[in-house]
Image (cartoon, grey):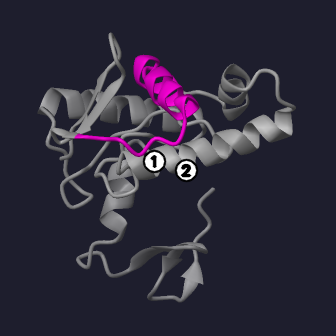
Amino acid sequence: MPHLSLALLGSFQVTLDGQAVTGFKSNKERALLAYLAVEADRPHRREVLAGLLWPEWPDRDALSNLRYALSNLRQVIGDRTAEPPFLLVTRDTQVLASLALPVAGILSDEPLEEVAEALAVLEDKAAALGTKLPSPFSTLSFLALPVIPELRLTDLGLVDVNEFRILDQW
């Protein structure tokens, strides 16, 4: 797993796996990374970030600047290829909870207690959104297994492959 390190006191320094990161195109990108690192315990709306970094700009231009800065920032720190990524970036939605599975996309290298706690938070958030499944993420993970050939999850929904029909999930 890659390691990103920031030094915020004194001169601003960023290292990725011990190597200096130097591709920042502006101080705004440095400020964005520092802010997101310091305030990593909560999600941030794009409008708020744009207003913090470009308060004198019209909203549309500030958001455009933020898109460009985020894109370059992710490129510079290797975020697009990092597993898990350093930044969790979404277009319009708020991430309520997450659990990184860096080992083949199905396992975590974190201690069992931390994974169990994160999974419990995920399941609580899913229940709050209306799921009736007691363990929705375990259910989803088993749908792709070849040992359960009757059901498949597709872009159309849950499919009974024996009867060739989409199942009603509600």
Q: Please, which residue is most extreme toward the right here?
A: 58
Q: Position of residue 69 (x, y in %)?
A: 59, 42
Question: In the rendering, at what x and y percent does residue 119 appear?
Answer: 32, 36
Residue that label 1 marks: 74
Q: Is 156 on the left or on the right of 42, as rendered?
A: right
Report the magenta residues as a range: 20-42
Residue type pointed to by label 1: Arg
State yes or no: residue 23 in magenta: yes
How many numbered dots are placed on residues in this image? 2
Give the crowd class for mark 1: few <14, some 14-19, many >=20 residues within 10 Å.
Answer: many
Asked where in the image residue 150 lies, by quadrant, the reply is: bottom left
In the image, which disc is placed on residue 59?
A: none
Residue positioned 42% across, 17% down in the render: 38
- Is label 2 in a helix, a strand or a loop? helix
At horizontal 36% and vertical 56% (from top left) the residue drawn is 139
SS at mark 1 in the image: helix
Locate residue 66 relative to residue 18 in the image: left or right: right
Q: Nearer the viewer, residue 63 or 10?
A: 10
Dividing the picture into quadrants, the one containing residue 65 is top right
> Callout 2: few (<14), some (14-19), or many (20+) C-alpha neighbours within 10 Å?
some
Asked if disc 2 and disc 1 are in contact, CB closer than 8 Å, the reply is yes
Residue found 41% across the figure and 35% down from its top: 122
Pick whichever, 148 or 141, lies toward us. Answer: 141
Who is closer to the viewer here, 14 or 141?
Answer: 14
For residue 147, what is the image quadrant? bottom left
Q: Identity of the amino acid at label 2?
A: Ser
**Residue in front for this viewpoint, 133 or 106:** 106
Where is residue 6 shown, x and y percent of the image?
A: 30, 25
The C terminus lies in quadrant? bottom right
Q: Residue at x 54, y 37 (%)?
A: 95
Q: Which residue has dot 2 on it?
A: 71
